[in-house]
Image (cartoon, rainbow, N blue to C red):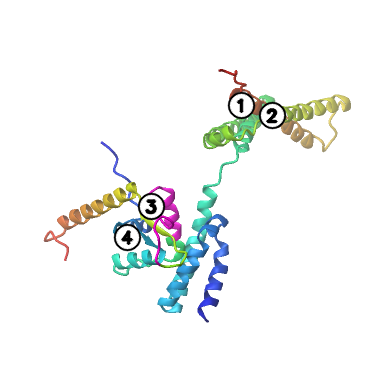
Amino acid sequence: MNSSRAVGIYRTLLRVYPRRFRDEYRDDMALLFAEQLHDGSASRVWARSLIDLTITIPARHLEAHMNRPPNPAVPVLFAALSVTGVVTAILAGSNLAIAGFGLAVAVMAGVLAVASWRTTRAVTAERPASAHWWQILLGGVGVLATTIVVLNIIGEVPDGWWVPMMLTLLAGIMTTATGLILGVAHLTTHRPHNATG
Amino acid sequence: MPQPAKPLPSASLHIVLALLDGESHGYALIGRVAELSDGAVRMGPGTLYGTLNRLVDDGLIEETTDRVRRDDSERRRYYTLTGSGRAVAVDELVRLQGLVHRIAAHLPGGAIA
């Protein structure tokens, strides 16, 4: 295999690196590979380069993934799930199994909400994801109100409808909680400033 | 008591030590690292540029490609240690010297054969 064909194949293999790394270093890496081919045994250079690619491609992808900015919606969803867990526990009444499950979900989701909020607050400060809080709140309240009205109209839940009805109620509670949390976060962090001087 | 700085990963250590001689480009760096390690460390392009990228992000090295007029017409990137990079490289050398001395002191006869 001639040298330019080998470098062409190597350049093709470099496409597997994350785009940002590839765009930055592809030419340098190909030049380095060509120089190594020029000065050493082709089979040794290929063997070393293939091992190098096998080790470094997953490493660069992992780095790229870890450097990606966190999603600001994650802490809000965990917080809403936590509130839903609390509401489920309250609604469960004397059913200790469901109440315990609701509380466990509330605690775990609450911890995850705090942990993810700590990593995303810089991002949320720059890019407010909470501006649509009132739409989410209205959506949640709308789902809850519709479900309650339907329940009142039909009087008794037909067989097989209990689970979908409960899931709809839980979705409504979770959406309402998300809207409330976003609203509080938005109104406390984006208060209008008085113009001075 | 101040905490000692965390040792550099192996590839980063070899590169900052190789750059103590002055600025260098990728191919020369690989050769210098192989020479300093007596042929034990032979970096591939992915390892080299991944490590250089991290060292630039950490502020230990900087690119000097456009700062100096080059004799060759090739589009190579040149790198050099920053002030803090040089300090880290010297700290690492001192740490390694201390390690060798302490190990030698505990060996029978007090020296490495």
Report the residue marked by disc 2.
A133
Q: Report crowding for label 4: few under 14, some 14 to 19, many 20 or more residues within 10 A (C-alpha).
A: many
Q: Compare residues A158 and A103 and report the one nearer the observer.
A: A103
Marks 4 and 3, Cα distance to the nearest angstrom? 12 Å
- In the rendered image, which residue does mark 1 sit on? A185
In the rendered image, residues at marks 1 and 2 fall on the same chain: yes
Q: Is residue B53 magenta?
A: yes
Whether discs 1 and 3 lie on one chain: the answer is no
Q: Are marks 1 and 2 in contact (CB under 8 Å)?
A: yes
* Picture layout, residue A80 above or below residue A6: above
Q: Chain of mark 4?
A: B
Q: Position of residue B113 (x, y in %)?
A: 16, 66
Q: Residue at the far right: name it.
A: A153
Question: What's the residue type where badge 2 is placed?
Answer: Trp
x then y, percent, for residue B111: 14, 61
A35 lies left or right of B105? right
B90 up-or-down from A159: above or below: below
